[in-house]
């Protein structure tokens, strides 16, 4: 398995997640969301792993108009609108196969590390 970190180069939580894996000698692929972003398949995989797209939304993002729009549009259009406007997604998104976390969660990262160690050694 390969750990992917989706985030921004200037985001401090993304830097913490990168540093966590680097200090432990675990390879992690960094994907800048401002340049590339999540594909539809990656978006769906992350949503399934964390329990819904609502947990992806950063309530403290700068685009308050888009947050307001998300609360008033139809339920079936929300996921598509988030995928189109990924600047409202909470970062970092750390993904390892079917596992994923949103935001810096140091208590969850060790379980991802163990999964990587298990897949490398077997």
Image (spheres, grey):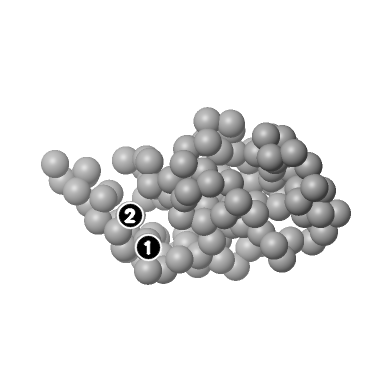
- The quadrant holding residue 10 is bottom right
Provide residue 44's location: percent of width, then percent of height. 52, 36
Relative to 4, 59 lies left or right = right
Q: Secondary structure at mark 1?
A: loop
Compared to 102, does 31 lie above or below?
A: above
Q: Secondary structure at mark 2?
A: helix
Compared to 32, does 22 lie above or below?
A: below
Work out which residue is located at the far left of the displayed protein and give it. 122
Relative to 38, 49 lies left or right = left
Provide residue 121's location: percent of width, then percent of height. 16, 46
Residue 83 visible in the snapshot: no
In the rendered image, which residue does mark 1 sit on? 108
Provide residue 20's location: percent of width, then percent of height. 41, 65
Dots 2 and 1: beta carbons under 8 Å? yes
Q: Residue at x 81, y 54 (%)?
A: 68
Q: Residue at x 26, y 50 (%)?
A: 115
Residue 18 visible in the snapshot: yes
Q: In the picture, which quadrant includes the C terminus?
A: top left
Tell me if mark 2 has few (under 14), some (14-19) or many (20+) residues whose alpha carbon lies within 10 angstroms of its own.
many
Q: What label sits on residue 84 in the rendered view?
A: none
Q: Residue at x 57, y 54 (%)?
A: 55
Provide residue 62's location: percent of width, then percent of height. 79, 61
What is the spatial separation of the Cα atoms under label 2 and label 1, in whole angstroms? 7 Å
Relative to 75, 118 lies left or right = left
Compared to 57, does 81 lie above or below?
A: above
- The quadrant holding residue 67 is bottom right
In the rendered image, which residue does mark 2 sit on? 112
Work out which residue is located at the far right of the displayed protein and give it. 65
Of residues 70 and 112, the one drawn nearer to the viewer in this rendering: 70
Q: In the picture, which quadrant includes the N terminus?
A: top left
Compared to 51, does 75 lie above or below?
A: above
Tell me if mark 1 has few (under 14), some (14-19) or many (20+) residues whose alpha carbon lies within 10 angstroms of its own.
few
């Amino acid at each position: 398995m390969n750990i992917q970190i989706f985030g921004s180069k200037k985001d401090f939580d993304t830097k913490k997640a990168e540093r966590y894996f680097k200090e432990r000698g675990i390879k992690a692929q960094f994907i800048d969301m401002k340049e590339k972003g999540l594909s539809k398949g990656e978006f769906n995989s992350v949503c399934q792993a964390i329990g819904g797209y609502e947990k992806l939304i950063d309530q403290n993002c700068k685009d308050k108009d888009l947050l307001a729009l998300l609360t008033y549009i139809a339920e079936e259009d929300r996921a598509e609108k988030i995928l189109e406007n990924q600047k409202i997604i909470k970062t970092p998104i750390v993904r390892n196969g079917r596992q994923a976390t949103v935001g810096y969660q140091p208590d969850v990262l060790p379980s991802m590390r163990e999964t990587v160690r298990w897949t490398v050694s077997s």
